[in-house]
Amino acid sequence: MDNFSVFEYCYRDASSYKAFGRLLLDGAASDADIQILRCHFESGEFFIAEQLGIPPLYAELWELSQGPTGDDHVWHTFERLGAATKEETNGEVFGTVKNLISSIADVATWNLRLSPHWDR
């Protein structure tokens, strides 16, 4: 589906328990878009979900641990941005590729305090 893309991301706590997320985006992502992401993410892959308005994935792990633990931290990890499959286009559209790329490019400094784990 050329008109939709999927942004895939992950939250991995310090014990390597993982929760995965994906956002359906209107528009086709280019290689240049992926380069922009990598240039603006910390170490080319880490970001603060709350700063971008992306749903954080902590709660999925909190269900297993009955709440936050000392293993929690602020960073989510970028996994992939690519064309959506036909099945993936059945979901709710989160926004546009252009707006997501713009939001990421606008980040000058990642604000750790936006995460509930900023002081860990």
Image (cartoon, helix red, strand yellow):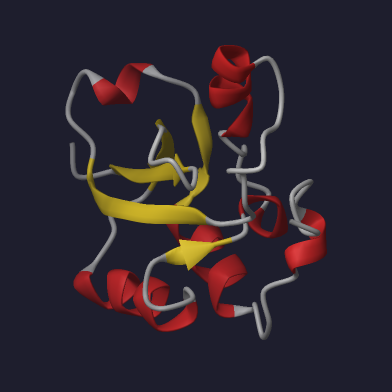
Tell me the quarter of the image containing the C terminus.
Answer: bottom right
Q: How many marks?
A: 0
Taking the spot 65% from the left edge, 77% from the top edge, the residue there is 107
Q: Nearer the viewer, residue 118 or 32?
A: 118
Between 35 and 99, which is closer to the camera in this rendering?
35
Quadrant of the frame with the N terminus? top left
- Residue 1 left/right relative to 48: left
Decide which of 19, 21 is in the foreground and name it.
19
Q: Which of 18 and 22 is in front in this view?
A: 18
> How far across and how far down the image is residue 81, in percent?
29, 53
Residue 90 higher or lower than 36, as above or below: above
Residue occupying the point 67% across, 74% down: 110
Image: 118 above or below 22: below
Q: At x 61% / y 67%, what residue is drawn?
A: 103
Residue 99 in the image: state x and y as whole percent: 55, 60
Q: Choose top left, top right, bottom left or bottom right for residue 30.
A: bottom left
- In the image: residue 9, left or right of residue 14: left
Q: Is residue 59 above or below residue 13?
A: above
Apparent side of residue 110 relative to residue 116 in the rendered image (left or right): left
Residue 89 coordinates in the image, percent (x, y):
31, 25
Q: In which quarter of the image is residue 55?
A: top right
Q: Would residue 17 be found to the left or right of residue 79 on screen?
A: right
Residue 102 image position (x, y, % from top left): 56, 71
